[in-house]
Image: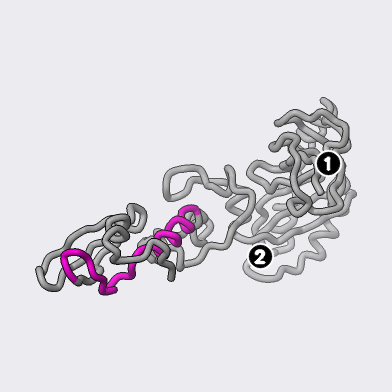
Amino acid sequence: MKYDIVGVRFKKAGKIYYFDPDQLTIPENAHVVVETTRGIECGTVVIGKKTVDEEDVVLPLKKVVRLASEADDQQVRRNKEDAEAAMDICLQKIYDHHLEMKLVDVEYTFDRNKIIFYFTADGRVDFRELVKDLAAVFKTRIELRQIGVRDEAKMLGGIGPCGRMLCCSTFLGDFEPVSIKMAKDQNLSLNPAKISGVCGRLMCCLKYENDQYESAKQALPDLGETISVNHGKGRVVGLNILERLVQIELKDENKVIEYTLDELIEEGAISSQATK
C-alpha cells in the first residue's frame, strides 16, 4: 500500500517525521501545525509531498492540522523567548537545591501545556523538589529529561576537530552506532584524542566511509597473505584500501611491486568474487 506524506522537522538537524498532507497544498520549507505524541507542535516541511511504501511509515499516519499562520509563527518565537527566561530561573533553582546536574536546554511545547528541561548528570538525580518549585513558578506541566553527551553536543553545537561545525548539530538527524573497529579498518590512529568528538565519544564521521572500506577489504587480500602473481609468489606487505592498491614483496626477487586490484584480478591472483 502507498501513502502520500510530507517530512516535517521540529528542530534544526532534528529527526524527520512523516505526516499525511491530506488535501492541503504544502510547499517545501513551509511551516505546519501537526499533532504529535506530546501534543500540538509547529514544524518545518523539509520533504515535500511524495508517495512512499507502507514499510517506510509508522502507522497510524497523523494528518497535518493546518499551514502555520502568522499568529502560529509569533507563538513559536514567544515560546523561544520565554524558554530563555525559564532557563535562567531553572539554573537558580538548581543552585538553590545544590543539585549535581547541568542544564542544557529548555523548550516549551507549541501549545504551552508543558515545559521540558534537558539536563546531563553523571548519575541519577533526585529532582522532585526542583519540579515542585518549577511547577509553582510556571503553573504548567514540568518535565526534566536527562540526555547523553551526544545529545548535549547536538543541542549546543560547536566546532569539531576538522574545523567545521558539528555534523550532529547541522545535518545528522539520528545518531548511528560507531565502533573502534571502524577506526581500525580505516588505519586511523587509535589515540582517543584524535578519533573522539567534542562530546568525548567516537566521531560520527567514522561511519561515513565505513561501508566503502568494508567492501574494499572484502575484495583485497589480507596483510601477510601469500599470493601468486606473474612475477612469482609474494607476500602482501601494504594496502591502500581507498585506492585499492596492494604492495607485494616478491620472495625470489627481493623487491616490492605495487598492483591495482584490477591487475591482480586479471592475473588470476585473486577472484573477482572474493569475499571474506
| In front: label 2 or label 1 | 1
Residue at point 85% right, 38% down? Answer: 64
The residue that disc 2 covers is 100
Q: Looking at the figure, which quarter contains the C terminus? A: bottom left
Q: In the rendered image, which residue does mark 1 sit on?
A: 20
Residue 119 image point, x, y percent: 68, 57
Q: Quadrant of residue 125?
A: bottom right
> Which residues are drawn in magenta?
208-232
**Could you say which is closer to the camera, residue 71 or residue 131?**
71
Q: Is residue 93 magenta?
A: no
Give the class, few, some or many, for how many residues have Cα within 10 Å of label 2's Cα (few <14, many ≥20).
some
Task: Please say whether residue 100 is visible from this viewpoint.
Answer: yes
Residue type for callout 2: Glu
Q: Answer with left or right where residue 234 lies relative to residue 83.
A: left
Occupied quadrant, residue 108: top right
Please indicate, yes or no, whether residue 198 appears anywhere in the rendered image. Answer: no
Q: Residue 32's x, y, as percent?
A: 80, 34
Outermost residue, top side:
70
Residue appearing at x 27%, y 56% in the figure: 263
